[in-house]
Image (cartoon, rainbow, N blue to C red):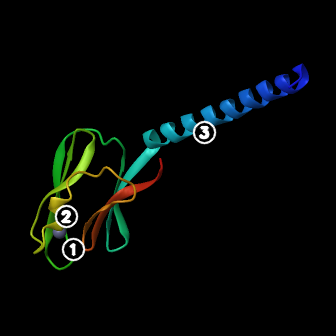
Amino acid sequence: MNKKTLLLAIVLGVIFLGSGGVLLVQHFAKPQSRTVEIVQDNTVLYTFRYPVEGEQTFRITAKDGGWNDVTVKDGSICISAADCPDQTCVGMGVLTSESLPIVCLPHKLVIRFGGES
Ligand SMILES: [Zn+2]
């Protein structure tokens, strides 16, 4: 390997690492601009900035009369209680993953990460 080739290899290496670094920063910066959506029957009822501020519990009533208590705590959100028969939504805990929304099938309620704020 002569000097010219070595120099080219170094330059390419720097460019490669540089672009990789930018991608890495974009990857980690993204979650800070996320939103959380509470969707009932394909209609967005609430949108929160994530992490969610404050601490509160509020009730969402389904069209069939059922309900879900949604709790905001420690920046995250969960369904803390519900009167659905399966209780799957309560058992899912807090929302952590974009690929795994909190879903209450009997009440057609979904809590998920939305688009950028
Ligand atoms: Zn449920």
Residue at mark 1 to residue at mark 3: CA–CA distance: 40 Å
Residue type at mark 1?
Answer: His
Residue 36: give its label: none
Q: Quick check: 111 left or right of 99?
A: left
At which x and y percent is residue 75?
A: 27, 40
SS label for mark 1? loop
Q: Earlier in the sequence, mark 1 or mark 2?
A: 2
Tell me the quarter of the picture where residue 56 sits: top left
Which is more foreground, mark 1 or mark 3?
3
**Above or below: residue 91 compared with residue 53:** below
The quarter of the picture where the N terminus appears is top right
- Residue carrying label 1: 107
- Residue carrying label 2: 89
- Residue carrying label 3: 23
Q: Residue at x 17, y 80 (%)?
A: 64
Q: Residue at x 20, y 73 (%)?
A: 62
Q: Residue at x 70, y 34 (%)?
A: 16
**Above or below: residue 111 compared with residue 51:** below
Neighbour tally class for label 3: few under 14, some 14-19, many 20 plus, Cα within 10 Å: few
If the picture is divided into quarters, which one holds ligand 1? bottom left
**Above or below: residue 79 compared with residue 49:** below
Which is more foreground, mark 1 or mark 2?
2
Asked if ligand 1 lies within 8 A of label 1, the reply is yes
Asked if ligand 1 lies within 8 A of label 2, the reply is yes
At which x and y percent is residue 81?
A: 11, 60
Please name whichever residue, 87 or 19, is drawn nearer the observer in this view of the structure: 19
**Are circles 1 and 2 on residues that touch, CB within 8 Å?**
yes
Q: Residue at x 39, y 55 (%)?
A: 98
Which is more foreground, mark 2 or mark 3?
3
Residue at mark 1 to residue at mark 2: CA–CA distance: 10 Å
Residue at mark 2 to residue at mark 3: CA–CA distance: 35 Å
